[in-house]
Amino acid sequence: MNARDELVHRLSIKRSRKLGSLSKEAFAELELAVREDPSNFVDDAEEQAFSVIVQALARFEESRHDDDLLDDEQYLAARETRMRRISAACTQALGLNEQCVDARLIMVLASDVTPDEQTGMLLGLDKQLEQDFGPIEPGAAGDAWADVFVRPRLRVRAALARACVDTARFTMARSNCEDLLALAPLDTLGARFTYALTLARLEDEEGFNWLDAREKRKGNAWFHLSRALLMYKLGRMPAARRALRGYDRLCAGGAYILLQPIFVDTYIPDRPAFEPGSFTEAMLAAHEAEPIIADTPDFVGWASQQPGFYDSAVAYCERNGLDWRS
Amino acid sequence: MAFDPQREDYQRLGLRFANSLSTASPTEATRAFASFGRRFARDRDSLPQSDADRAFGLVAAAAKNIDYELPFATDEEAEQIIARGHALLDEAISLDAQCYDALRMKAAAEHPSFESFYTFLFDQSDEVRRTCEERRDKAAAACEGDERAQLAASIAMRPYVRWVATQAEQALICGRNKEALRWAHIALETDSRDTGDVRFTAALTYAKLEDEQGLDALTMASKTHPHTRPSNDAWTQIARMAIAYKRYDLTEAAQLFDQLARTYPHAAESFVRQLELPDGVFARLAVRPYSEDELVLALSEATVLLQEGRDPDGRGALGSWVANQAAARLPQSVLAMLAAEAEARAQDAGTNGADQGGMS
């Protein structure tokens, strides 16, 4: 989540509303001034609360930088502190504005509950927001994301869709992703990636092909992995082999990450940013696909036996000085 | 109802015996048949039979060994039982190279993964169907009277029904749910009486695909069938509970759990344990309907539903939720006993390495 940008945008809009209709140029200038020092432009409790979240998220990210140097025990301790701190920040934000959606969302995500309980909490939050503020609308721009004040609610939905995948509730995951794509067709949050995995798990080839066509068949790690899983599940082995080759060829480290999964921590509050085609992309896709891969118990074994796949994983590992656990 | 190898052996030889009496007068025939039951029990081999019948007799013996005795054997006994089972199956195949039950049971032990066993079944299924159909036509033609011919035809097709039923189960385990449904429906079309309760596998699969309509259609179809029991078997009830859970209708899921607990004795304990057992190698074990054993069996097959999803306890999302539901309905003393049991099992698994999986 690009929290600071959102804050700048929110504050600029609020200030410009106060000033009356600004020209495009004047608005751009205002935005520059806000970017320089947002705190000067915080006029209400809502933005105070949001600012607290923005700062907390920045600290949260910073505190992760040294994770690689920690052993398991130290890592767990550091993680606990981190989660406790961000929860405390959420409490502080909610003290300023009890409606702060991002604070409520992060509170749920950072809490130490099972994925099942988390799903229930996110579902409850989404319903409450709908009750309090009405349904999310695509708005004049035709994309709800364009309204910066609606974005937190889209994040809640996207987190809910992922929680549904994590707890094997795929019809619910599907309908949440469908809603998100209808409300925000540009899909800045990448609900379509969750959707692709969901359709693979439900073995919905027609749905997957529709989504793939919507994506102009450009694909990425989620799409390639989902297609390989889908074809494997449908027992269409030549197509599954082709899809797996595509995944291996087009996703940096894709083969490696499938054979050597890496722990990815809870998304706070949404999927981390990644460069298209990067190893991070493959890592996030494989992480999100984990429950579906586990439900297809021989998929990884099958993949590693396909010509070139294992070698490709080893080669990537060596080229990048990564670990290989046997 | 399930495939009962002993009963099927009895039926096969009974049919052949009856056919051999067709030239006798009705009184002679009645008298001769009166002795059949005794001869079957005491001196099976003295009864008239083909090589295929002999092979099936060996399969029945192996099934008894592997499916019904092995789970209760000590480690030392287990090795002997497995060796004896394999020898019986080898002998069956040497008598009848197309003894598909024996071939399938051997393959179950020999294939290293679900995937490779499934592929083996998939590759052979057309041939199995062709052979069984040929045998069915021959067997029916050799019988007098419609009823006998029907039974003969049904028995001749059973190895194929078991083949595709196993294929459906394996597909489900492999995460190939649409394939599982396809094979389950082929089994149901081939044997409309559903002798092997393949619809139970289909019920779990519909839950995997979260296809409530499909599950409704399945139970409606069996409702109109005179031979099947009502759709309150453990498999269908677990499937319904899973679908409610997946909808996040936890109130309904809890009600469905309570309904299940009223249908089966000691259900809460079984749901806390959630034992995973080796599948029957001949076919799903024949146990008494609505018995505790039946629920244990259904829960073991429902592992694919229970253990799916992330869960800190490693029980899967639904598995964890329903175990908690069950635990909340049990007194502290029973929970303590179950915890001690689980610990003993974990220690046992630790000392014996991996779980004893089937006959491999």
Image (cartoon, coloured by chain):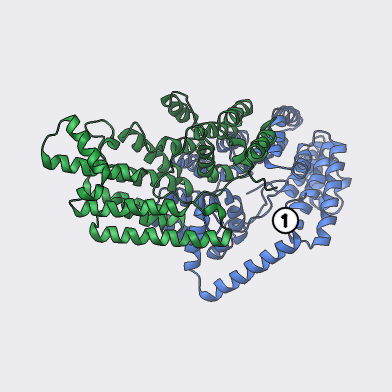
Chain colours: A green, B blue
Image side of residue A244 versus residue A21, left or right: right
Image side of residue B13 versus residue B260, left or right: right
Q: Residue A3, how many percent across, how many down?
A: 33, 45
Residue drawn 83% across and 34% down?
B97
Q: Quadrant of residue B11?
A: top right
- Vertical placement of residue B190 versus A110, above or below: above
Q: Residues within 10 Å of mark 1 (few under 14, many from 20)?
A: few
* Amino acid at pointer 1: Ala
Q: Quadrant of residue A256?
A: top right
> Under tag 1, what secondary structure?
loop
Q: Residue A18, how many percent across, how many down?
A: 12, 42
Chain label for disc 1: B
- Give the total number of marks visible in the rendering: 1
- Asked whether residue A302 is in view, the answer is no
Nearest to the observer: residue B48 or residue A188: A188
Q: Residue furthest bottom?
A: B333
Nearest to the observer: residue B176 or residue A292: A292
- Asked whether residue A81 is in view, the answer is yes
- The residue at which mark 1 appears reads as B354
Q: Residue furthest left?
A: A20
Image side of residue A16 versus residue B23, left or right: left
Q: Residue B223, how many percent across, how many down?
A: 49, 43
Nearest to the observer: residue B202 or residue B21: B202
Nearest to the observer: residue B316 or residue A98: A98
Q: Residue B261, how many percent across, how many down?
A: 50, 61
Image side of residue B352 versus residue A97, left or right: right
